[in-house]
Image (cartoon, grey):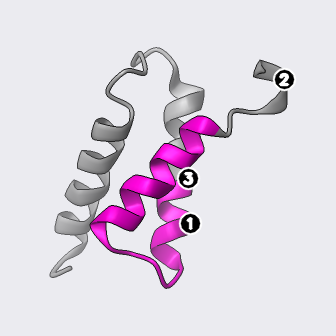
Amino acid sequence: MSSKAELAALLRAVLDEVCANVPLSDAATRQRVAAKLRETLRGDRCSLEDLKQAGRDALISAPTMWR
């Protein structure tokens, strides 16, 4: 990534894509996905596909109290 602004735009795009079917009012889910994206970015896996997969995984692994 060339800049923090480009990185932020990439993360927002991935978040929006992964959460396309999540209502904007469901802030908790969107926050969980965003946190997983940031965690993935800090690791060694930071390709676009890695970020998308991490976001999808965060959606699948809902907190136990919601299952």
As drawn, is 55 to the left or to the right of 52?
Answer: right
What residue is pinned by disc 3? 35
As drawn, is 35 to the left or to the right of 67?
Answer: left
The quadrant of the rendering that contains the N terminus is: bottom left
Q: Distance between the residues labelled 2 and 3?
A: 19 Å
Tag count:
3
Q: Pick whichever, 34 or 67, lies toward us.
A: 67
Magenta-drawn segment: 36-60
Q: Which of the 4 image quarters holds residue 51?
A: bottom left
Q: Distance between the residues labelled 1 and 3?
A: 6 Å
What residue is pinned by disc 1? 39
The quadrant of the rendering that contains the C terminus is: top right
Circles 1, 3 touching at the beta carbon (< 8 Å) = yes
Q: Which of the 4 image quarters holds residue 15?
A: top left
What residue is pinned by disc 2? 65
Please identify, in this view, whether the residue under mark 2 or under mark 3 is nearer the observer: 2
As drawn, is 15 to the left or to the right of 28?
Answer: left
Residue under the point 33% across and 63% down: 49
Residue under the point 44% across and 55% down: 53
Q: Which of the 4 image quarters holds residue 60?
A: top right
* Residue 14 place in picture, x, y as percent: 30, 49
* Residue 42 place in picture, x, y as percent: 51, 77
